[in-house]
Image (cartoon, grey):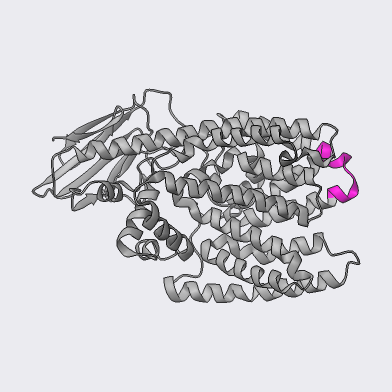
Amino acid sequence: MPHSFLPYKKPLLAGALLCIVLVVFYPCVTSFFHSDDLDQLWFVSKDGPLGIWKNTPQDYFRPLVSISLWAEWKIWGLNPSGYHVTHCLLHIVNCLLLYFLGRRLAFSETASAIASLLFLVLPGHSEAVAWIGDRAGLWATFFTLVSLNSFFAARRGSRQGEVVLVIGCVLGFLAKEAAILLPAFLAVFNAMRPGTDGSPLKRRGIRWVFGLLLLIPLYFLARWFYVGSLLGGPGGSPRISAFYIGWGLLRALPATLCPMTTSSLAFALAALVLLIGGVWVFLRAERDVRRDVLYLLLAFYVAVLPASWVSLSPPLWGYDTRVLYLPSVFACLALARLLETLRFARVIATGLFLLFAVQSFVIFQQWNKAGVWVKEGLATMASFPDCRRRIVLVAPDIRYPAYVFRRGMASGLRLFHKDAPPEIVPLALTVFYTDRDRVEITPETDGVSVALHYATPAIKRTPAMGAKTGLPLTLKTSNPPSFHLTLPKSRPGDQIIYFSEGRFRVWNP
């Protein structure tokens, strides 16, 4: 493939690419905050650089995230665009580091550019980029890519490369737990590119792999000393089992590379096309290409294994696609390595880039709209009469884009409104956010009956998030879409609110 494929060697192509990128990410940059964002900003605003760490569950050990958000709080304050610009720039830097990693692996400029550009606009990355609360994933990927790039210099004996490798590894550990897989990635690349004679470089690489492995026990000790647990919990997983792990691994690659779809059937068809097309190209490729792809897939599945039991539901909801941000580094490299072997590689890559760009733009627009809902919701609640305690019976939530209001409500009121209630009982039931969904509340002798009336056909997942566990209000019965709740003992100054038909409302028993 000619090197002129690279955009920067063709000014018109580079300009067109820049315009596409600006259009795609514009809705993200102009978006408001989204629930968890408000929590994290409130924590660092009142408790300083380690505020998130001090106010989150014991298994949260990501000090770099807390420090970086505190530093930005000092710069941006309550301006959401500043934080979103930081996320977008960090994502773009990760794309550039991915390009350089491809070159370190001796991939052609064409393959490296394809991997970088597809990584830039993968629709599944929308959650990690748009959600400030998931900065950990971007930081962990950044330091992983820095370490992988510097590994090849360190393996040749470069002192500078050695220093950057160690620093990148340590900072990656402090960004997110997934970064402890870095020594495994180094082992894969060390075997994938052993050097010209296959001996000296490989031996030095193995020494570095074992050396960095020694940092992992120190990391666990630090976690245990500061937060009292060795490793964080499995996110949204209902339970850890061989079935969930197997199912997560089975659908991880299609969920990473397939376009976001609107139904399980569409996802299955897209995954089947990806599988058949990938196998066909793989079998036709030369031996060196097949070897590289197998090593990259090995790295991908190593990266995705810790998250394989997390609820990686179909892309219908975009649920937890952020856990695929780091693994997609290796998936994009493998895809680009295969694509460059095709006769019309540039045409296919351009088509995929445009398809992903359009989908990412649509998803970022949805995030933008979700931010508008959060802003309007906070303004509506601020207009309610003053109260001592606000009890939230029903609040909007949707997982695609993520977390409209299920978290961050109290923090948002405290950040943006000085007269926030001293106590806010965390929300219980959550209803899908449409302007036509309606809630009906009926008083009962021992509580209230809440009925959710959907304007659209029934959704496949439970309409109440956390209906069985974690509710601050006792859930007596659950027969979706109706729920029977007890209420806290009434106090003077209580106010009960709920969400219905596109807005928060005060309920008067």
Find residue 319 and report its horizontal and vertical position in percent: 51, 42
Q: Is residue 457 something that shows in the picture? A: yes
Residue lying at the far left in this picture: please name it: 492
Q: Describe residue 141's horizontal placement relative to residue 319 as left or right.
A: right
Please state which of residues 221 and 386 is positioned toward the viewer in this rendering. 386
Q: Position of residue 140 (x, y in %)?
A: 57, 58
**In the picture shown, does residue 368 fall above or below 134?**
above
User: Looking at the rendering, in which quadrant would you find the C terminus?
Assistant: top left
Q: Specify the segment rendered in magenta.
A: 279-290
Q: Position of residue 283 (x, y in %)?
A: 86, 41
Does residue 409 sit above or below 57 in this rendering?
A: above
The answer to whether residue 486 shows anywhere in this view is no
Does residue 344 appear to the left or right of 10 in the view shown?
right
Residue in view at x 76 percent, y 64 percent: 152
Q: Tell me if residue 284 is in the magenta stretch.
A: yes
**Residue at horizontal 35%, vertical 32%?**
481
Query: Splitting the image into 4 quarters, where does residue 276 fall?
Result: top right
Q: Residue at x 43, y 73 (%)?
A: 226
- Magenta part, dominant SS: helix
